[in-house]
């Protein structure tokens, strides 16, 4: 087990160096710039974060990524867990991603859970963090996340499940939508 932990630490350091030194290699394939947010707002029933109840925002952060405001797009602890899981079980865990990584997946990658996608998610998450504020990332995430029943984004989810706008949701309705993230 000590050998696995040592290997995991070595791999984490290697991944960290890779992410920080070679981040711009993917820029041509995945344009992350100021136009990205404009493209998203044009395609969806976009709603600004200040119109989403803070109870909902707080609960989503707590459920999905309780260190959201502390990391730079990825969690080294989660990377280590993922590496150990791959070494011991042979597969990547599904629900071990930061909000920024989930946004990167929603924007640019398939839902396929493989090593290449996970590495790309790390790189793209760092790029997103370099180009947008935490609140902008959270706002885009809330507008692009699948809540089931074909409802993409918090505006559609509020309308689909409760026939109301997000700012009119009760605390119980907010909790219900947060729980849907684990199901969908």
Image: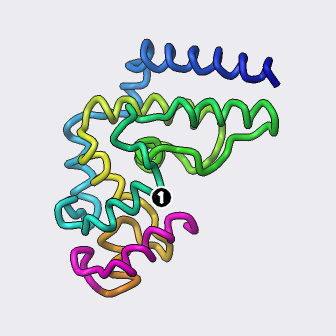
Which residue corresponds to the image point at 29% horizontal and 71% vertical from the top-left? 155
The magenta region covers 164-184
Left or right: 85, with 174 as reference point: right
Quarter the C terminus occupies: bottom right
Q: Determine which residue is flagged by label 1.
A: 63
Which residue corresponds to the image point at 38% horizontal and 80% vertical from the top-left? 173
Asked whether 88 falls inside the magenta stretch, the response is no
Q: Where is residue 7 in the image (x, y as percent from the top left)?
A: 72, 17
Quarter the N terminus occupies: top right
Above or below, 68 relative to 76 = below
Which residue corresponds to the image point at 40% horizontal and 60% vertical from the top-left? 60
Above or below, 152 relative to 23 = below
Label 1: how many residues lie within 10 Å, few (<14), some (14-19) or many (20+)? few
Left or right: 65, with 7 as reference point: left
Asked whether 179 falls inside the magenta stretch, the response is yes
Of 2 and 90, the residue lying toward us: 2
Residue 8 found in image quarter: top right
Dot 1: what SS?
helix
Left or right: 94, with 139 as reference point: right
Which residue corresponds to the image point at 27% horizontal and 54% vertical from the top-left? 139
Total labels drawn:
1
Does the magenta stretch mainly form a helix, a strand or a loop? helix
Q: Where is residue 153 in the image (x, y as percent from the top left)?
A: 36, 65
Left or right: 66, with 46 as reference point: right
Of 19 and 61, the residue lying toward us: 61
Most extreme residue toward the front, as rendered? 2
């Amino acid at each position: 087990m000590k050998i696995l932990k040592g290997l995991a630490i070595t791999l984490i350091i290697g991944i960290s160096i890779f992410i920080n030194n070679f981040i711009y290699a993917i820029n041509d394939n995945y344009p992350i710039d100021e136009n990205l947010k404009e493209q998203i707002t044009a395609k969806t029933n976009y709603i600004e974060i200040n119109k989403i109840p803070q109870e909902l925002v707080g609960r989503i952060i707590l459920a999905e990524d309780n260190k959201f405001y502390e990391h730079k797009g990825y969690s080294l602890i989660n990377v280590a867990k993922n590496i150990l899981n791959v070494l011991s079980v042979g597969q990547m865990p599904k629900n071990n991603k930061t909000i920024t990584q989930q946004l990167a997946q929603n924007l640019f990658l398939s839902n396929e859970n493989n090593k290449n996608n996970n590495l790309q998610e790390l790189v793209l998450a760092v790029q997103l963090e370099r180009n947008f504020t935490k609140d902008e990332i959270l706002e885009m995430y809330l507008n692009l996340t699948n809540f089931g029943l074909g409802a993409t984004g918090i505006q559609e989810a509020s309308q689909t499940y409760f026939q109301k706008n997000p700012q009119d949701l009760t605390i119980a309705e907010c909790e219900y939508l947060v729980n849907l993230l684990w199901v969908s």
